[in-house]
Structure formats: C-alpha cells, structure tokens
Image (cartoon, grey):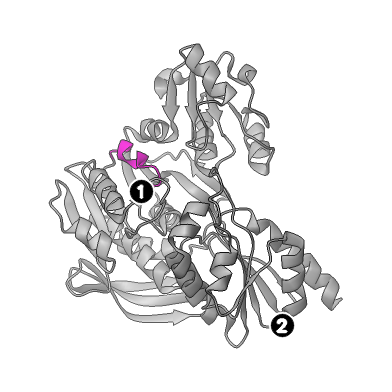
Amino acid sequence: MQTLQGKRIHFIGIGGSGMSGLARIALSDGISVSGSDAKDSSVLTALTALGAKVSATHEAANVEGADVVIYSTAISATNPEMAYAVERSIPILTRAQALALLMRGSRSIAVAGTHGKTTTSSMMTVALQACGVDPSFAIGGTLTASGSNAHRGTGDFFVAEADESDGSFVEYQPLAAIVTNIEHDHVDFFHTPEAVTKVFDSFAATISPDGFLVYCADDAGSKRLGESRLSCTPISYGTSDGVDLALDQIALKAMGSTARVMWKGRAVGTLELQVPGHHNLLNAAGCLAMGMALQLPVHQLLDGLHNFRGAGRRFELKATEHGIRIIDDYGHHPTEIRVTLEAARRYAGDGRVLVIFQPHRYSRTQAFLDGFATSLDLADDVTLLEIYAASEKPIHGVTSELIAAKMERGHYLPNFVQASDRIIEMAQPGDVIITLGAGDVNSLAPIIAEGLQRRFA
C-alpha cells in the first residue's frame, strides 16, 4: 500500500460497511480516495468530511484518473465504472484483496464464523485497546465505543472481520484467526453445508504456521475444524470439558452476564459483560483465548471486555418511550434470531417481545423456512415484512408469507407503514420491540419511537 501514497484509489460501492472501512484506512495511510455508491447516505457524508471525493451515482467519469479500482461483490460486471476500468486496463482488486494488502506487515487477527463475526471483531478490538496496543481494525459494523467501523492504529495488531459469504476470506493469510461457529448460510453461493466446510478448511490453511486458530469447541463445525490437521497451533474455548479456555459458573442477566474464566485448568479471573446472551459470553471467550495465546495481560483483556458496549445493529438500544424499549438487531439467520430472542426474553422480564422481521434474500428464506418459523415463534408476536432482496432476483412463489404460514405468532404485513402502526398500537409499557433483519428494517425504529411518543402524549 505504501506504493499508492500520492496516488488515487477508487472504490465502487464505497457506502457499504466493508468498503467504507477500507476507504477510511486508505485515507489514514495518505492515499487519495474517491468512490461511488448507488445512493447518498451518512456514510458518504462522513467519508467526504475525511477528504474522499464521493458520488451518489455510478458513472464512468468517476473513475477517470484513478490508479487502482476496488469493488464490492455487489457490483456487477456491467457497472459503468467497472466497464471503464476494464477498458482502460486500470488495476482492479476485490474488497478482500484490498483488505489483505492493508493487513500485510501487521500481526493480523482474522475473525471468522457464520455468526458473531462483527461482535467478536469489535470485542477483540476493544480488548486489545485496553492492553494499550492501539490496533488497526476493519469491522463490518460500527464499533459503539469509537463510532467507526475502521481505524489505522499505531500498534502492529490488525483485527479484520473475515466474511465467508463469497469465499474471499482465503485472501487474508492472517497470523491468527478466531472461528466462532460454522453453519450453512449464504445458500446463493454455498449450495451445500459441505461447501461451507470446505471453504473454512481452505481459510484455516492460510493461517501462519507460527500463529493460532482459536476455535469454539461448543460448536460442532468449529470443533471439527479445530481438531483437523492444521499447520498452526489450535486453541479451544467454550464450556465443554477439556478446552484451553473454559467458562463456568455462568450467570445470565437481563443486560449482561458473568462467568469464571479458566485458562489451562487454572482460574484467571471473572468475565463480566454489559451485553446480553450466552452467545456473547462465547464471543468474549474467543477474544480472551486469543489474547492469552498472544501473551497479553489477562486482567487488561477482561477490563476491555467489561467496558465493551456493543456494535451497531447488534442488540442495539435505539430508544425508550414510556417504558417500551426499542432494540435494533441485524440477525437474519435462524440461529442468530434464536439467540437474539432468547436474550430479548431475559431483557424483557415480565414484558412481551414484539418483533418486526424482514427476511434477507429469497434464497435464504427458501432454504430455511422451517428454521425461521421456529426461531421467530420464540417472540410473543411477529410482524413479517416482505423479503429484502439485496442483490438477488425474486424466486417465484417465495415470500415472507410462507414463514408466517408456518408460525403460531406470525402476521404477514409487508407494508412498512402498516407494520409500524400495528406495533405502535399494540405495545404496552414493559414491552420490548425489536426491528430484526439485515435489510432496511432498522429505518422503522425512529418511526416507531415517534409514534409511541404521540400515542402516549
């Protein structure tokens, strides 16, 4: 990347969480940045303030003068900017290839897994910061403590969220990695569970022989990977017998949890979190195991994790109106929904859990219909919006109504206004409302808050 100082990188799809993070780091490295996205957003505004030249439309003219083009996987070959770059023989990199370049020369930690990557990457970053090492990071969500998804630190650690969705995380070649879990998802790319298993095997093979694979022994897929033949050192964590870093004496609370931490059979401290759910205890355990493997001070790691306040769109409290709490969460796979709603049940106490859910992608909805129905029925009431397509074309006959038909408490109401009005009218003090999904369902949280203000005025 040093060779690009004084030159210009153009990002196609710069408004995405991963791409905007790379742009931030490139700007920190003294590289000129331009970029485009399909629509304007607060992300584009923030990048402009940092010195990037951005456009809310895709046009070939945006690429003129660029030395390198980086594109997100959502960008098609017919995009006018891509076509221009190909025609002019401008070097083109994928987001993963660019991130791999940014990580080069650092003690890089890649955080992978079907679920929990963003939260675990965020926890790892905060834990390292508490040790005074000022890591660089590139995360697929906003770190609440800093309000940013990326940062070029002064230390030699680099924490990167490693997205498996298109298999490109094999580019990273990290010193070390955390794998939280392995489950079938991204069915548009991985048609079988075996395909997911295979790509994680390929990812693990890229870890430095001098490094570590930190894996969750409580998850079958992650455990299989950790116990396979690896060139690096495997380190296990979880609540299972015989793991390197074990949690016991677990106490789950409404908005947090505690557990005793055992390292190689010896008690080393107490983990206290201010984010809810058993799954977050495991995410934190993975970070602790990595920190211990890197020989960082355990008490500083624990302090950092205790002060962790979460990541954007991960069980994020958006508002409280007349005793009704509004939570936004990115969960879009049946497993993620289950753990989110289990945490929400403790958080709600005697109140109800009311959900507005927006499925993400037709292929995922079709593949996991039964799982969605079962997980969502953990709530007291669920309003189902229509499917958020992302970059997919519709699949004939696949709608959110198919999920509602399999549920006891599901109500298909695809209109955003009607769905919001329904929740506003039925909510009572003590209830918890969750806007749930990876699309734009989060835009309803402030609308619901305003509606509750009017209703109870």
Please, is residue 17 above or below residue 264 in the view?
above
The answer to whether residue 6 of the structure is visible from this angle is no
Residue 170: within the magenta? yes
The residue mark sitting in front, 2 or 1, is 1
Near mark 2 (Cα within 10 A), the count class, few <14, some 14-19 or many ≥20, is few
Residue type for callout 2:
Pro
Which residue is the site of mark 2? 429
Q: Which residues are magenta?
A: 164-173
Amino acid at pointer 1 = Phe
In this view, 222 is above or below 455: above
Q: Nearer the viewer, residue 56 or 395?
A: 395
Percent across and percent down for residue 349 are: 57, 85
Residue 304's x, y, as percent?
43, 61
Q: Which residue is mark 1?
A: 190
Q: At numbered mark 2, what does the secondary structure look like: helix, strand or loop?
A: loop
Name the residue: 50% across, 59% down.
365
Specify the label residue 155 is tagged with. Answer: none
Q: Above or below — where is 135 with respect to 309?
A: above
Image quarter of residue 115: bottom left
SS at mark 1? Answer: loop
**The N terminus - image quarter:** top left
Badge count: 2
Say which residue appears at 51% left-offset and 62% top-offset: 331
Q: Is residue 330 above or below residue 200?
A: below
